Amino acid sequence: MEEQQAGKIIAHVDNDLADLIPGYLANRKKDIAAIADALEKKDMAAVRIIGHSMKGSGGGYGFETITDIGMLMEKAAKEGRDEDIRQQVKRLEDYLRHVEIIYD
């Protein structure tokens, strides 16, 4: 579950996932670089795969916003909409910068 609170994004994550979360979020930062590289190469298939992966994994870790970003990114890649992909990358960067995790 996620909530907004005084400019922060609070994500409530299952305590059992505590060891996995730092790596998961680090991999999303790597995705940002991979997407930028794929866009430069006009490789929409790579962007679609990354978006699909985020769509499938975000909610399972407690990050519904990542699921939403991945869904929109996958759709934009299928339709070849570079600018929409860039908007979702910016949204992901912003999210990763502001998310705070509370382990429940």
Image (tube, helix red, strand yellow):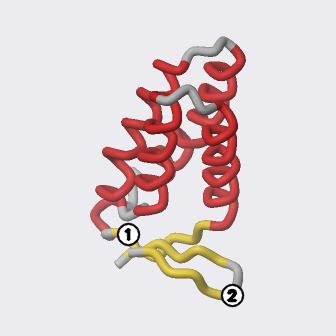
Tell me which label, 1 or 2, sits earlier in the chain: 2
Left or right: where does residue 52 sit relative to residue 4? left
| Residue 83: numbered disc | none
| Residue 6: numbered disc | 2
Question: As shown in the figure, which amino acid type bears the numbered disc 2?
Answer: Ala
Residue 87 versus residue 79 in the image, above or below:
below
Count of numbered marks: 2
Give the structural element (helix, strand or loop) at label 1.
Answer: strand
Residue 79 versus residue 73 in the image, above or below:
above
Q: Position of residue 41 (x, y in %)?
A: 66, 12
Q: Residue at x 46, y 45 (%)?
A: 70
Residue 76 versus residue 2 in the image, above or below:
above
Q: 26 or 78, which lies in front?
A: 78
Image quarter (top left, top right, bottom left or bottom right) of the C terminus: bottom left
Q: Position of residue 7 (x, y in %)?
A: 70, 80
Q: Nearer the viewer, mark 1 or mark 2?
A: 2
Left or right: where does residue 66 sit relative to residue 84? left
Furthest toward the top, the residue is 41
Q: Residue at x 62, y 56 (%)?
A: 96
Q: Position of residue 10 (x, y in %)?
A: 53, 76
Left or right: where does residue 7 sit relative to residue 80? right
Quarter assignment of residue 5: bottom right
Q: CA distance from mark 1 to mark 2?
A: 19 Å
Mark 1 Cα within 10 Å, few/some/many (few <14, many 20+)? many
Quarter assignment of residue 31: top right
User: What residue is pinned by disc 1?
Assistant: 13
Question: As shown in the figure, which amino acid type bears the numbered disc 1?
Answer: Val
